[in-house]
Amino acid sequence: MVQHVYVHVPFCHRICPYCGFYKHQPGKTSYSDFADALIGELRFARKECEVIPRTLYFGGGTPSLLPGPVWKNLVSGMSQEMNLAGLEEWNLEANPRTFDAARAAIWAETGVTRVSLGVQAFDAGSLEVLGRDHGPEDVAEAVRALRQGGIPEVNIDLMFSVPGQRLEDWEHSLRAAMELEPDHISTYNLTYEEDTEFLERFETGEWTADSDRDAEFFLLADQLLGEAGWVHYEVSNFARPGRESVHNRAYWAGADYLGLGPSAVSTIAGERWRNLPDTVRWAQQISGLGHARQDAERLSEMQRGMERLALLLRTSDGVPRAWIEEDLAETLLNEGLAKFRDDRFVLTTGGLMVADEIAGFLC
């Protein structure tokens, strides 16, 4: 039985130069045809496995671009294909300038419990470099609209180590986000992704990566949010106590999940596949075959175990002590990168900064 479902909505009214996810501007596929294809893909998936979701996550792209009537029809169609009665969390990603309180009310009425705002920064310089089309005032209005519309939980996404961003700019963004009183704040270290304008500028030497600078930004977020009572429960995520993301926790714990939409990835019963990263072709294959899967692979128990270890190390829960060889654990403990908490092996703040490297060391 699959309890976690991800839906990829690739539409963006403007393409951000740093984003490596599959996305495009609306046009070749209508919103309503896209919604119909999603329902068809879910119908096919249900023939192979039982889908009773505890969590739903609509990412992108910009899911908040879907018009109200299309959204209602999509939710109605999906609810006929799977039982949503046990849903604990329904997350929707949104651009601050793409909705109002009336649209937020539609989301709340149909079951959305959490909206993640792609804010990235609160200073004009960073927003311009990132190609964002909103300003700080739009974010404040978006949070008000979500609260008025009845959305129970609000997340704000922020990004650090943006080219030209100063430490004081980052501090301003963190404090501005906290002032809006969201339930969750995500802080992502900028990475230079394939097939982006940012990577091209990085490869020419115009922009550079600096691990020391990254560490300064990371530690400032940990300090400011920690002092304000936020729980740093994963490398890039902070929450008010009890407001941690159920969906993301499932990913980090290695749970199975079904991915719907172009480019979405699924991992079910040791099998992993990715959908075609082409909306038109994806919809055509859904219509003809019922699915648009490619790159399927069977994961070994060792692969699954290593993935789970790497993901859980990024969290405040860490991993069972028995998973770590004693000599390797001793090395990390002596370097101040890890500690034992009860019967768990947990990374320290310094360890979290290099969690991926530590995972490679342990695996």
Image: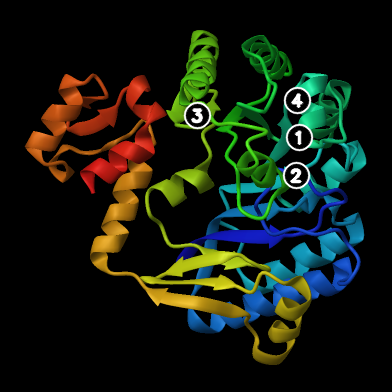
Please identify the residue farthest to the front as the structure is shown.
204
Q: Quadrant of residue 161?
A: top right
What residue would you read off at disc 3?
242
- The residue carrying mark 4 is 126
In the rendered view, tell whether residue 103 sits above or below residue 262: above
Q: What percent of the width, then of the height, locates residue 131?
A: 81, 37
- Give whichever of discs 4 and 2 has the lower sequence position: 2
Q: Is residue 125 above or below residue 24?
A: above
Task: Tell me, for residue 17, which label it has, or none.
Answer: 2
Seen at 88% across and 41% down, the residue is 99
Q: Are marks 4 and 1 in contact (CB under 8 Å)?
A: yes
Question: Mark 1 and 2 residues: CB-CB less than 8 Å, in contact?
Answer: yes
**C-alpha distance separating marks 4 and 1:** 6 Å
Q: Residues within 10 Å of mark 4 (few under 14, many from 20)?
A: many
Vertical position of residue 295 compared to residue 192: above or below: below
- Element marked by disc 3: loop
Determine if residue 1 is in view: no
Q: Amino acid at mark 4?
A: Ser
CB under 8 Å between discs 1 and 3: no
Q: How many marks?
A: 4
